[in-house]
Amino acid sequence: MALTDTNSWTGIREELLRRIHDRVWEPGAQIPHEADLAEEFGCARTTVNRALRDLAESGLVIRKRRAGTRVALNPPQRATLTIPIIREEVEALGKTYRHSLLERDYQPVPPMLHGVFYASLGDDVLYLKTLHFADDRPYAFEERYINLDTVPEARQRKFEVSSANEWLVHNAPYSRGDLSFSALNANEETARILDCTPGTALFAMERITWTGDAPITNVKLIFAPGYRMRSHI
Amino acid sequence: MALTDTNSWTGIREELLRRIHDRVWEPGAQIPHEADLAEEFGCARTTVNRALRDLAESGLVIRKRRAGTRVALNPPQRATLTIPIIREEVEALGKTYRHSLLERDYQPVPPMLHGVFYASLGDDVLYLKTLHFADDRPYAFEERYINLDTVPEARQRKFEVSSANEWLVHNAPYSRGDLSFSALNANEETARILDCTPGTALFAMERITWTGDAPITNVKLIFAPGYRMRSHI
């Protein structure tokens, strides 16, 4: 307790977090009333309330009107997920990276993105097909749409030196993104591009990133056979 | 600035975070020297240092000995990842959940877990095969090893009423977990169990959870065709 900064709700939150992590308060256990905690910490009840609200928003405690506050049984853990620069991912494997731009053209917003790229419905979007290599073997096949309303500078880029993936990470910072992961059987085109047999199970990731309410890009990455995505909680 | 609690490093961190998120300091930009920030906040330089160290550990700023501190270009975003109770996941889809225990026996530690379940090398581990259903259709096929050194109570459980997944979430809280995601082609057994054609691309997740240094369980989940895992950053 000596180190708790009870002047701030963040200080109180740190101490509450410590008690949850150290299992002073076990999963599912009721925690003391706000008023009792305020007394213990020698702070205002509103300060304890602010800290508890924050923990509730993160899913670490469950607050019920009459039943008080409990430690969550199955708190969401947070995993670090970044939008990788594929060049860096390949180089981290000790392999040599290069990419090849297979297609670059302007297209109307494709039907699957109606309602997403709404801002540019009248406009064209930039469509790119890129193949990423690791040591001259296909690593991932990328299909991407870029919203030119949000990133008009993309018109001037050829994406031959820097891939769109790398250029966007540096030049079009996102505030949020929706990701989905799935498995698919290689079709004829994908099999040819990724140098595998049609039907091979491939790991795919789809991602839309936004800056505020404006969509930046929609990308589908299909990885070569054997790809494994790792994470920690 | 009025709301910054400059008495604590967490207060300082909140304000630095705000400036990064609001792009007062843009990605890649150099941020003021520690001494200048300490002066601005009217706090000790060590307090600023503690806050910056925390931001550097989260990958939000990059500190270089001579070059000072910069805002990261591609900061890792954190996604919420939980160990789902499959029953709840299925029910959230508006479907009826049930599970069926296909196998339950004691086995020596399998070779792939040597070096992980080291604590129980002499011992047997509990091996379970479970099929999860959504509206009477196969949803996910689960193969699981439970470390009986860590969770001896599992010996007494049949896992017929509550699945091992649900029982462990409630009774064997984990402190960390390693996850991997991949795609695989259904083999004969998996195809039969998940009621699909051999060769179908399936999404698979492997997970090991730990409490401190003690492994709790290793699980491999293979989802029925069409499964999509979603996440947000």
Image (cartoon, coloured by chain):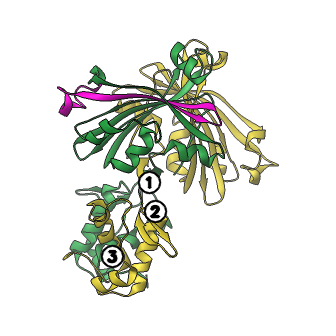
Chain colours: A green, B yellow
For mark 1, what is the residue? Answer: B76
Which range is magenta? Answer: A113-142
Image spot of residue B77 (x, y percent) = 41, 52
Q: Nearer the viewer, residue A230 or A116?
A: A116
Q: Quarter of the image containing the N terminus of chain B?
A: bottom left
- A85 left or right of A110 in image: right
Q: Nearer the viewer, residue B174 or B199?
A: B199
Q: Nearer the viewer, residue A123 or B170?
A: A123
Mark on residue B58? 2
Q: Inspect the image, locate mark 2, and give the three-letter code of the amino acid beneath it.
A: Ser
The lab-note entry on whether marks 3 and 1 share a chain reads yes
- What is the residue that sits farthest to the right in this orientation? B122
For mark 3, what is the residue? Answer: B12
Image spot of residue B65 (x, y percent) = 52, 75
Dot 2 or dot 3, earlier in sequence: 3
**Residue found at x 61% / y 60%:** B212
Mark on residue B115? none
Element assignment for label 3: helix
Dot 1 or dot 2, earlier in sequence: 2
Chain under numbered label 3: B
Q: CA distance from mark 2 to mark 3?
A: 15 Å
Q: Are marks 3 and 1 in contact (CB under 8 Å)?
A: no
- A90 left or right of A101 in image: right
Q: Is residue A19 visible?
A: no
